[in-house]
Image: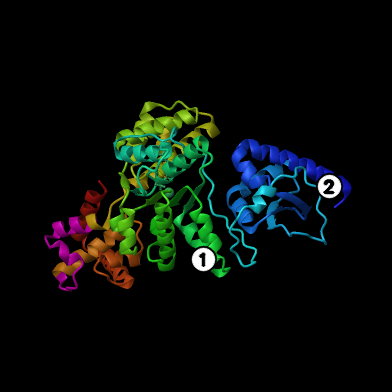
């Protein structure tokens, strides 16, 4: 490194520190970032060093994004920021002088030294989406309990219930609420340490820690937080050792009266592949479910999103969307974005006609949301056989034919794969479903009354 580059880097480092301090607050800055020293820049890698391994891991898991962002804006050559553990006296690599000589007190603090020397960065917390705030969350009957519980946890000074367990289907706002809690706490009680991550990431980190034999550091870090949020917990269903680890972390945190917030797609008791003791523990706090959206809520969300985009939309269009797109909020948002983008692009205002045109594929998919169970029920009724015959092993023509029709319609009207359909029909093989589909097609081409029958069923199911 040349002398010129050196002072250039030092000046940049001072500015980066300034930004870190103002963005993270004095307390966090003093505890974690001030003790860092600048080690150099080579091939796009900006090297920093931390006094202990624990601090290094903590910094990487909490502040790596900011460090990288600030450094790369200050010094465009920086592609990556690495943090290593400082050598007590490094004779080989002279370091540039420190801009400040703080941080000594941190080094004398008893900080757990847990890893065995492998250079593993535990990147624990996931980034938060800036749009996922309480302000941007539209409430209605289906989500009012979950919203109230989330606010309560965010605003509380003491843990009001543990854990807070939020559950509901895909795209109904679980992740949004969790991020909102994290933002709120970050802004109002910045000294509370939060980890937010998906269960998948928890598992990934745990497996990594096992591989690099630094599970002690892994545990330390999870157990040093005030608020632990784990999203999509169902992911660790059936993953025994991860569950075990999570269970211990969970208990340790609850014992120390730290807040835990969980989300999942099912209620604790319905989480299959989850150990019984875990399921029961999960239900100890407050369990709040988010129900599927209602028309009113969908309309409210659309209005709020349109306002956020700074667009005035014809009420007819919003009503139409709220009616038609019932699956989840993510699709609703996607639809709105698409029509807005389209209108901007062609420079004409949004109308009901353009909306239908732009969204035809999405609308069709939403129209067709028929379940295999409904198909089986309708077909059984139509042919006057018992519903249980749909899954039975009987091969008599009187039940086998209707069953084949139901399989055929399942293939036509749902997006399920052949094996999935087979499973729903009493665990039949996918080749059986394929055979049924062919058989029905063949019959339709030769027997027009049969074909009319199938069409009638199809229309009933679609309507
Ligand atoms: P989940 O985690 O339950 O699958 P998300 O929280 O990711 O769902 O929500 C999907 C999308 O829908 C996000 O963009 C989120 O902001 C939005 N969303 C969901 N519910 C609401 C709501 N009540 N108000 C505003 N936006 C919402
Ligand atoms: Mg989610």
Q: CA distance from mark 1 to mark 2?
A: 40 Å
**329 is higher (above) or lower (below) than 220:** above
Is 276 on the left-hand or right-hand side of 9?
left
Query: Residue 390 lies in what quarter of the image?
Result: bottom left
Q: Label 1, on which residue?
A: 207
* Residue 176 screen position, x and y as percent: 43, 42
Q: Is residue 226 visible?
A: yes
Which is nearer the eye, 378 or 16? Answer: 16
- Asked if ligand 1 lies within 8 A of label 2, the reply is no
Q: Which residues are magenta?
A: 375-397
* Residue 435 screen position, x and y as percent: 30, 70
**348 is higher (above) or lower (below) than 360:** above
Which is nearer the eye, 164 or 438? Answer: 164
Which is nearer the eye, 252 or 317? Answer: 252
Q: Label 2, on which residue?
A: 6
Q: Residue at x 30, y 53 (%)?
A: 283
Q: Is residue 445 visible?
A: no
* Sequence order check, earlier mark of 1 and 2: 2
């Amino acid at each position: 490194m040349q002398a010129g580059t050196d002072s250039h880097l030092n000046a940049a480092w001072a500015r980066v520190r300034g930004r870190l301090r103002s963005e993270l607050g004095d307390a966090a800055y003093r505890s974690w970032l001030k003790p860092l020293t600048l080690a150099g820049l080579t091939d796009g890698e900006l090297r920093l060093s931390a006094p202990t391994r624990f601090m290094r891991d903590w910094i990487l898991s909490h502040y790596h994004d900011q460090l990288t962002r600030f450094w790369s804006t200050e010094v465009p050559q920086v592609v990556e920021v690495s943090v290593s553990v400082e050598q007590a006296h490094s004779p080989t690599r002279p370091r540039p002088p420190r801009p400040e000589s703080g941080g000594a007190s941190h080094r004398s603090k008893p900080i757990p030294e847990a890893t065995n020397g492998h250079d593993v960065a535990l990147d624990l917390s996931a980034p938060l989406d800036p749009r996922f705030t309480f302000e941007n969350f539209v409430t209605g009957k289906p989500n009012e309990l979950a919203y109230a519980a989330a606010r309560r946890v965010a605003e509380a000074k003491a843990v009001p219930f543990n854990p807070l367990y939020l559950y509901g289907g895909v795209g109904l706002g679980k992740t949004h609420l969790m991020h909102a809690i994290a933002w709120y706490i970050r802004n109002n009680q910045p000294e509370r340490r939060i980890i937010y991550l998906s269960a998948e990431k928890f598992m990934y980190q745990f497996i990594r820690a096992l591989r690099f034999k630094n599970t002690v550091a892994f545990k330390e870090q999870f157990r040093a937080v005030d608020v632990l949020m784990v999203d999509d917990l169902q992911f660790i269903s059936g993953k025994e050792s991860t569950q075990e680890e999570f269970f211990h972390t969970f208990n340790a945190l609850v014992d120390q009266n730290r807040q835990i917030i969980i989300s999942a797609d099912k209620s604790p008791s319905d989480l299959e592949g989850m150990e019984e003791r875990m399921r029961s523990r999960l239900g100890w706090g407050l369990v709040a479910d988010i129900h599927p959206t209602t028309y009113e809520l969908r309309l409210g969300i659309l209005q709020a999103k349109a306002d956020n985009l700074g667009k005035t939309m014809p009420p007819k269009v919003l009503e139409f969307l709220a009616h038609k797109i019932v699956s989840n909020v993510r699709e609703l948002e996607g639809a709105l974005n698409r029509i807005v983008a389209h209108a901007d692009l062609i420079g004409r205002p949004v109308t009901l006609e353009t909306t239908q045109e732009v969204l035809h594929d999405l609308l069709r998919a939403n129209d067709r949301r028929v379940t295999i169970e409904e198909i089986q029920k309708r077909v059984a009724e139509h042919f006057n056989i018992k519903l249980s015959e749909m899954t039975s092993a009987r091969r008599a023509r009187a039940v086998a034919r209707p069953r084949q029709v139901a399989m055929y319609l399942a293939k036509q009207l749902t997006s399920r794969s052949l094996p999935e359909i087979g499973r729903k029909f009493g665990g039949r093989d996918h080749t059986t479903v394929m055979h049924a589909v062919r058989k029905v097609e063949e019959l339709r081409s030769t027997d027009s009354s049969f074909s009319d029958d199938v069409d009638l069923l199809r229309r009933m199911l679609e309507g």
